[in-house]
Image: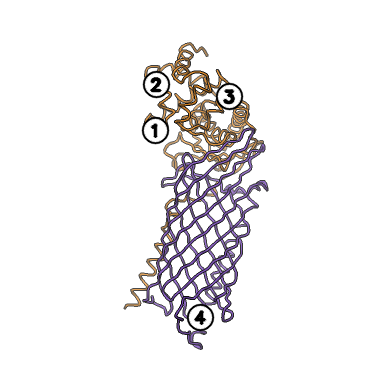
Chain colours: A orange, B purple
């Protein structure tokens, strides 16, 4: 009877060990193998067999190649690695919150996104935004703020195949002129977290797109790695004017921007 | 191919244990274990073998964890030196392990592509174990449970070469405190095998050194977790000499500001032990 109890306890302990532990709880699930690979010049495109993404893989690859060239040129990057793009059929398929989601993994030069019809601006800008995370972080290192990480990935969207870059960001900014968060709030990681994500992403991207166009990529590269406090302190010395003045200049530009 | 090799070494180790257990039982029938000495048994062990390393960066570290679809995988030699002082129900062990992984690949889930030779991952780990064993045997003669604590200090360097002569070198220094649960089987002096399950929390300082046309550093403090599952065994060959093995896998996560990753390290080590 006693021996049976010990056997039961030991088996229970073994089961606990097998199914628990930090690694089980906090480790990622392994990738499934239901993928077909299309090799491009500077990327490998992984799609579900028979999916919408597979039907349009040539077009998607063409957009990504263009984005690769545009981002590298805009920032003067030396990065010449190979991207790995995974296109999922739905948010549920990808384990993401919606069909308009994506994630990037710069250390392994990869990203994933949900590819659902139509093949329009939303899909192309989502894919390009995630690709930009990989290109920018592998080219420049890690940014010090969410403002820079997320804003720059959208600010550098190429508009060869869609109009989701400056042609979307600047009119969007103008239409919300009175409701925009202060740039100093967005630079602060705490303030970024308290701002609605859609507003935070687009406002940051609009400001950074203007900043690159007006003052060039070299100064932007100087503020890129700075954390929130450092960036607020050093904007003035790098750009020769305080952040408030830069913000005012940006808003005047937005008011007068003509496509 | 590497996974197959890992599985093969695992199967070989399991087979060795399964074969050795009945041998040990037979030995126990013909030989009476010597009574425990007054002082602790002091043992030095040196072993070497292979380590396999796998890395995934994370986009979201809270469960359900969102990890990269690509695994950065390498392997290389590992060596361990340990010193232990054991009484029948108590153990102190100091252990130093060094390993260097190369031959890196990207495992994409459907294919494996080779990485540049400059990709490296090296580790230097020191740890201390204190362990107590329960006097009451479980359902087999010689099978006892134990619990313990482990302190681990480690330094690692991960070097990742991207196209265009861009290089990312991550150097992390970590300190971990962990709880250990064990099952130890030692029915005679000839064979001693112990399975361990370890879980702990980690404090880390990491720096990413990024070299492109300009060089930048991103230092930050972080935290993490560690799980170790392993089996170690001693098979006595002579009065003071034993053959030893260790088969184990470490799973860990390190979470820093704006970046996090998980990694696993599997090791299969064989060596010798000298008992003073």
Q: CA distance from mark 4 to mark 2?
A: 76 Å
Disc 4: CA contacts within 10 A as few (<14), some (14-19) or many (>=20): some
Q: CA distance from mark 4 to mark 3?
A: 71 Å
Closer to the chain start, of discs 1 and 2, is: 2
Position of residue B89 relative to residue A256, above or below, is below
Q: CA distance from mark 1 to mark 2?
A: 17 Å
Q: Are marks 3 and 2 in contact (CB under 8 Å)?
A: no
Write the residue at 51% across / 50% down.
B173
What secondary structure is found at the residue carrying circle 1? Answer: helix
Residue ID for mark 2: A180
Q: Are marks 4 and 2 in contact (CB under 8 Å)?
A: no
Q: Are marks 4 and 3 on the same chain?
A: no
Residue ID for mark 3: A217
Q: Position of residue A216 (x, y in %)?
A: 58, 21
Q: Position of residue B214 (x, y in %)?
A: 62, 33
Residue ID for mark 4: B189
Task: Say which quadrant the N terminus of chain A sits in.
Answer: bottom left
């Amino acid at each position: 009877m006693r021996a049976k109890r010990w056997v039961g306890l030991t088996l229970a302990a073994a089961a606990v060990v097998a199914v628990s532990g930090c690694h089980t709880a906090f480790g990622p699930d392994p990738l499934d193998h239901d993928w077909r690979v299309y090799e491009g010049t500077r990327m490998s495109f992984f799609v579900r067999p028979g999916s919408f993404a597979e039907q349009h893989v040539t077009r998607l690859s063409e957009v990504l190649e263009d984005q690769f060239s545009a981002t590298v040129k805009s920032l003067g990057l030396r990065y010449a690695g190979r991207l790995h793009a995974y296109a999922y059929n739905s948010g549920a398929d990808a384990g993401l919150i919606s069909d308009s989601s994506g994630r990037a993994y710069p250390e392994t030069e990869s990203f994933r996104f949900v590819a659902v019809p139509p093949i329009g601006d939303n899909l192309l800008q989502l894919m390009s935004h995630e690709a930009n995370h990989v290109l920018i972080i592998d080219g420049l290192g890690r940014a010090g703020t969410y403002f820079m990480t997320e804003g720059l990935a959208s600010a550098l969207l190429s508009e060869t195949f869609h109009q989701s870059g400056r042609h979307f960001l600047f009119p969007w900014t103008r239409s919300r002129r009175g409701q925009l968060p202060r740039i100093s709030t967005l630079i602060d990681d705490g303030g970024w977290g308290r701002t609605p994500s859609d507003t935070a992403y687009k406002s940051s991207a609009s400001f950074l797109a203007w900043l690159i166009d007006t003052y060039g990529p070299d100064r932007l590269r100087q503020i890129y790695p700075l954390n929130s406090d450092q960036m607020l302190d050093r904007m003035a010395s790098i750009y020769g004017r305080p952040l408030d003045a830069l913000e005012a200049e940006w808003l005047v530009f937005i008011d007068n921007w003509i496509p | 191919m590497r996974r197959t090799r890992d599985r093969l070494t695992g199967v070989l180790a399991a087979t060795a244990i399964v074969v050795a257990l009945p041998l040990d039982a037979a030995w126990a029938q013909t030989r009476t274990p010597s009574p425990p000495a007054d002082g602790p048994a002091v043992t030095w062990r040196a072993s070497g073998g292979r380590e396999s390393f796998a890395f995934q960066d994370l986009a979201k570290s809270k469960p359900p964890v969102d990890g990269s679809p690509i695994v950065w995988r390498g392997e290389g030699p590992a060596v361990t030196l340990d010193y232990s002082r054991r009484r029948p129900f108590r153990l102190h062990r100091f252990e130093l392990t060094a390993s260097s992984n190369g031959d890196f690949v990207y495992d994409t889930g459907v294919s494996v592509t080779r990485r540049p030779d400059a990709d490296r991952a090296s580790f230097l780990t020191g740890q201390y174990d204190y362990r107590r064993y329960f006097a009451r045997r479980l359902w087999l003669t010689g099978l006892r449970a134990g619990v313990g604590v482990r302190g681990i200090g480690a330094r690692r360097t991960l070097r990742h070469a991207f196209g265009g002569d861009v290089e990312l070198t991550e150097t992390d220094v970590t300190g971990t405190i962990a709880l250990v649960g064990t099952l130890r089987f030692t029915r005679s002096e000839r064979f001693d095998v112990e399975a361990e399950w370890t879980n702990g929390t980690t404090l880390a300082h990491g720096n990413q050194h990024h070299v492109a046309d300009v060089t930048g550093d991103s230092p930050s403090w972080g935290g993490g977790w560690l799980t170790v599952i392993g089996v170690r065994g001693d098979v006595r060959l002579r009065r003071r000499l034993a053959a030893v093995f260790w088969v184990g896998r470490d799973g860990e996560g390190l979470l820093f500001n704006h970046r996090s990753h998980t990694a696993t390290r599997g090791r299969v080590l064989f060596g010798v032990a000298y008992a003073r």
